[in-house]
Image (cartoon, helix red, strand yellow):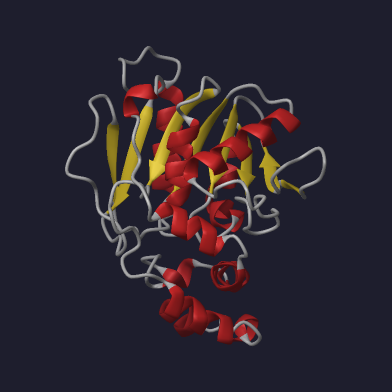
Amino acid sequence: MTSTPVMPSRDSTLAHDRAGSGEALVLVHPLGADRVVWEPVMERLAAHHDVIAVDMPGFGESPELPEDVPATARGIAAEIGATLDSLSVGRAHVAGISLGGWVALEFAKSDRCLSVTGLCAAGFWARPLGPRPEAARGAAQALVAPLRLILQSERARRLMLRGTIAHPERVPPAAAYRLVRSYALSPGFARANAEMRKSLFEGFEDIRVPVTLAWADRDRLVSPPRSVASGVHTVRLHDCGHVPTWDSPDQVAAAILQTTARAARPVSSGA
């Protein structure tokens, strides 16, 4: 199945890939990446849904937010709503990784959300992503010119992606290049990273749709919080890192699809 890329324009707020049919499912990538992270699961998800994998503002091919709009998870969620408006999509399921998971949870507070899946979601720790990433980004920026050639090497992919992916050898060279380049050069990185570190997610009680939080057992950046709201379904992703889509597309797709299937059943308040 082939997805259709759409660049941002007056009629589409965020760049995105779109494939499949059925109820809409929005996919939101992690900080420092772009929508390429969803390639391993697009076909699986598009067999059941109208899948819309977006680039967050200032990442991939999406423009940055205006300077007077904070690059918070809530602000990014609003851009997703605007993109759905431009596509004449009323309600949608949403899933996201890391910061994208937090964005998904913020979107889930609206009456437009059908279900939400957070994969290794940010928003639950005072120091997300461990140490500040400025030094690592600087090193990546210095390597941008030869990156495409360097990342043909499986050894290089292991070295550069092992912090976020348990099995970097499973990432194709072209996708690895997009990941590292996005991490190094995304103009929206600094603002989104700064905002992410200022607060924590609050408001499970405002979510009235099925919620799944999935945690990877080889995640080097985040771990499951000690407690979550009642009604939140938790899943363990086995042999997966912080960005689990290449590590185990089957587990990731299953976590999302099991959540979207739950949307047809009543859920308790706060779930």
Tell me what residue is drawn at x 70 percent, y 57 percent. 61
Q: Nearer the viewer, residue 197 or 67?
A: 67
Q: Nearer the viewer, residue 4 or 102?
A: 102
Corner quadrant of residue 261: top left
Corner quadrant of residue 60: bottom right
Residue 50, percent from left and from top: 64, 32
Residue 93, percent from left and from top: 52, 29
Residue 222, percent from left and from top: 29, 57
Tell me what residue is drawn at x 68 percent, y 26 percent. 89
| Residue 17 relative to residue 162: left or right | right
Q: Nearer the viewer, residue 201 or 89?
A: 201
Q: How many marks?
A: 0
Question: Would residue 1 be seen by someone viewing this image from the given angle?
Answer: no
Relative vertical location of residue 82 with respect to residue 184 in this rendering, above or below: above
Query: Quarter holding the C terminus?
Result: top left
Residue 229, percent from left and from top: 24, 29
Query: Quarter holding the N terminus?
Result: top right
Q: Residue furthest right?
A: 10
Q: Residue furthest left?
A: 226
Question: Would residue 75 be seen by someone viewing this image from the given angle?
Answer: yes
Relative vertical location of residue 266 with respect to residue 22 in this rendering, above or below: above
| Residue 83 relative to residue 117: left or right | right
Tell me what residue is drawn at x 29 percent, y 64 percent. 220
Tell me what residue is drawn at x 45 percent, y 50 percent. 99
Relative vertical location of residue 166 with respect to residue 265 in this rendering, above or below: below
Q: Residue furthest top?
A: 266
Relative vertical location of residue 257 with respect to residue 231 in this rendering, above or below: below
| Residue 146 relative to residue 13: left or right | left
